[in-house]
Image (cartoon, grey):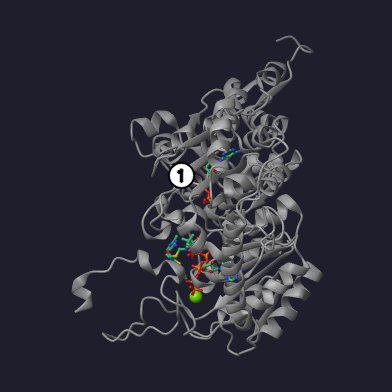
């Protein structure tokens, strides 16, 4: 070329970054290394927030919950084979939980991988990702980066949200092309998650069934929380006068202390309701598949509101399926209800109120316990009061007893403030969720973790300290999984469910410049949590819990297989 006519060039690195920015993706969660180290550096230089984790699984969980909180795909960036596999658990988790996420992974040379000639970190990642996510794409040419990312975004957030895999081979990043042509190849995704309006006949059918009920119930799931249609949902529930039961991550969508909340009368409402309207909740194991003992003898009619048509009739017959996005469906209900909707029968409401008040009264004295070492209720009583005073705090929760008891004890007051183990009951979401929650919302985070649960992502306390995030981690330290009291009668090794007794997790935090506190009573715990939330300093509180206080598998011990042979 003649001097002065050199064209401006761009490359794969910059096209990926430009495509992300064009689509409003401003945060990446990941772990650097070949071939994506420079991508992370350049993204940071270009104004994208790049949070560097200690393990890809935690970065992936962070991306997944970022997707839940924002309705935009959370992005996780990993290196090839082992990094990719570490991130893949979180991608599968996102898909299972219906959270939009994109796992972007570098990969090795296609020609060598496909001939299985032993490349650095060789693996056919696209093929492995495919069955575990909603969609998977690979980009081989720089001019296809724009389309590749557009497809990934649309696949993640449209319809039922989920995880998407985007494979970017190392060679792609260094491909060079004309900058103008490159810019023109980028795609800004228009209306990535279009409204999905329910059919008027399905709306009418659903309301007719609901109207006919003597003992109606609305179950709100995390799909309803995700939809961010908070006002419409509240108006619909209140106008209907129907009691509602929040699934775990839907707690706070309407306040747990709302007069129509049946959370503290769960078994009663499931058994006795005659019409159940599911809004963004699946009839999976968490709802005993809609049948069996949990649901009692009386016949039930189910109405289901979901964006995924294939969800209908998955476990039991749905007499009134309403397919659409929850915002549109609930608005359509409100429009079609008219002015003179009669509230649910009052004897049903008073049955529920009585059961609820009984359960609340039964629990109240336990929450006052100031015993040391603490039991779960004493410790949670302190935390419940803190969340009531600071309702904007994001409450992250995992463990077995630590999870199940906190779910019941700690009332939530605002939408999307409770983040937990979700559909798989997975341990390990704790620190990743906390980091993303702090980063995406700017709100303080209180993570209440079983000591086992914490161990799955505990190294990320360094990440929390490094980015100086306003996260207070409370470890319910009962010396083990479910309890710290098991003994191994057969040898010198400790029992399989116990850890080092009297561990001091608070010292881990001090190693990285955070605040560590050892709390042995509810009063100490309360003081330490309030100080942490006031200061915003990264804090870890080792809450000493009686090792004998918990029960096997918390509230789901019934899921442990039981052989008659063991019972002899
Ligand atoms: O109506 P009734 O009378 O029945 O009463 C109900 C409510 O009405 C009432 N209630 C109230 N009363 C008064 N006041 C209020 N405010 C109130 N609110 C409610 O209370 C009862 C109970 O209500 P609830 O909770 O709503 O109802 P219920 O019946 O429990 O609901 C059923 C379910 C199924 C919906 C619910 O139980 C649920 O959501 N469960 C989720 C359970 C779950 O996901 N658990 C996590 C998995 S456990 C296990 O797998 C663990 N592992 C293995 C492992 C995992 N998971 N992952 C990986 C990657 N590897 C391995 C491990 C390793 S847990 C675990 C670690 C455990 O050890 P930790 O040290 O971490 O934890 P600790 O146990 O603390 O030691
Ligand atoms: P939970 O565990 O709280 O019961 P689930 O994860 O089982 O909730 O169910 C969530 C449901 O919500 C899924 O079936 C999903 O398709 C649906 N969903 C997610 N987002 C939307 C939305 N915007 N509109 C309608 N349905 C949605
Ligand atoms: Mg424990």
Q: Residue furthest bottom?
A: 372
- Image coordinates for residue 48, horizontal then vertical, percent: 73, 41
* Quadrant of the rendered image containing residue 233: top right
Q: Residue at x 67, y 83 (%)?
A: 522
Quadrant occupied by the N terminus? top right
Q: Does the image show residue 457?
A: no
- Image coordinates for residue 357, horizontal then vertical, percent: 62, 71
- Image coordinates for residue 100, horizontal then vertical, percent: 58, 40
Quadrant occupied by the C terminus? bottom left
In the depicted structure, whether residue 177 falls above or below residue 131: above
Q: Residue at x 69, y 31 (%)?
A: 23
Is residue 195 found left or right of 339 in the rendered image?
left
Q: Nearer the viewer, residue 556 or 364?
A: 364
Q: Residue furthest top?
A: 2
* Quadrant of the rendered image containing residue 391: bottom right
- Circle 1 crowding by C-alpha within 10 Å: few under 14, some 14–19, many from 20: many
- Image coordinates for residue 53, horizontal then vertical, percent: 61, 55
Q: Which residue is mark 1?
A: 301
* Quadrant of the rendered image containing residue 411: bottom right
Q: Nearer the viewer, residue 74 or 423?
A: 423
């Amino acid at each position: 070329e003649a001097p002065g006519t050199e064209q401006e060039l761009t490359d794969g690195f910059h096209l990926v970054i430009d495509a992300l920015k064009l689509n409003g993706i401003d945060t990446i969660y990941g772990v650097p290394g070949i071939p994506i180290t420079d991508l992370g550096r350049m993204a940071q230089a270009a104004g994208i927030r790049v949070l560097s984790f200690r393990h890809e699984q935690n970065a992936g969980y962070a991306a997944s919950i970022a997707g839940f909180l924002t309705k935009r795909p959370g992005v996780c960036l990993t290196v090839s084979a082992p990094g990719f596999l570490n991130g893949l658990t979180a991608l599968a988790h996102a898909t299972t939980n219906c959270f939009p996420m994109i796992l972007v992974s570098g990969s090795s040379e296609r020609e060598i991988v496909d001939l299985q000639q032993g490349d650095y970190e060789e693996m056919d990642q696209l093929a492995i990702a495919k069955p575990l996510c909603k969609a998977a794409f690979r980009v081989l040419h720089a001019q296809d980066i724009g389309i590749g990312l557009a497809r990934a975004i649309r696949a993640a957030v449209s319809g039922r949200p989920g995880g998407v895999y985007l494979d970017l081979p190392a060679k792609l990043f260094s491909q060079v092309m004309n900058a103008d042509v490159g810019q023109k190849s980028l795609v800004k995704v228009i209306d990535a998650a279009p409204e999905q309006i329910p059919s008027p006949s399905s709306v009418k059918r659903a309301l007719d069934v609901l109207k006919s009920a003597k003992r109606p119930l609305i179950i709100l799931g995390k799909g309803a929380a995700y939809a961010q249609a908070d006002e419409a949902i509240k108006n619909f529930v209140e106008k209907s006068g129907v009691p509602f039961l929040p699934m775990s991550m839907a707690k706070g969508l309407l306040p747990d202390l709302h007069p129509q909340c049946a959370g503290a009368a769960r078994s009663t409402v499931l058994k006795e309701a005659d019409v159940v309207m599911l809004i963004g909740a699946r009839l999976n194991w968490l709802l005993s598949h809609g049948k069996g003992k949990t649901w009692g003898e009386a016949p039930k009619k189910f109405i289901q509101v979901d964006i995924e048509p294939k969800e209908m009739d998955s476990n039991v017959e749905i007499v009134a399926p309403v397919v659409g996005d929850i915002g549109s469906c609930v608005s359509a209900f409100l429009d079609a209800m008219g002015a003179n909707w009669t509230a649910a029968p009052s004897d049903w409401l008073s049955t529920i109120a009585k059961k609820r008040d009984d359960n609340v009264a039964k629990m109240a004295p336990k929450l006052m316990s100031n015993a040391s070492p603490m039991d779960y209720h004493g410790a949670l009583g302190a935390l419940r009061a803190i969340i009531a005073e600071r309702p904007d705090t994001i409450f992250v929760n995992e463990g077995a007893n630590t999870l199940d008891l906190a779910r019941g004890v700690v009332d939530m007051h605002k939408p999307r403030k409770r983040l937990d183990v979700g559909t798989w009951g997975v341990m390990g979401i704790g620190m990743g969720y906390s980091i993303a929650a702090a980063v995406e919302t700017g709100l303080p985070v209180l993570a209440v973790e079983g000591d086992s649960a914490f161990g799955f992502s505990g190294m990320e306390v360094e990440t929390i300290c490094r980015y100086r995030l306003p996260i207070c981690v409370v470890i319910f330290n009962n010396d083990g999984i479910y309890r710290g009291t098991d003994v191994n009668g057969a040898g010198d090794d400790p029992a399989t469910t116990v850890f080092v007794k009297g561990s001091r997790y608070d010292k881990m935090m001090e190693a990285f410049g955070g605040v560590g506190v050892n709390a042995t009573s509810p009063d100490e715990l309360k003081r330490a949590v309030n100080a942490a939330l006031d200061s915003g300093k990264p804090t870890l509180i080792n809450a000493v819990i009686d090792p004998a206080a918990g029960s096997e598998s918390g509230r789901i011990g019934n899921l442990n297989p039981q052989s008659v042979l063991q019972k002899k």
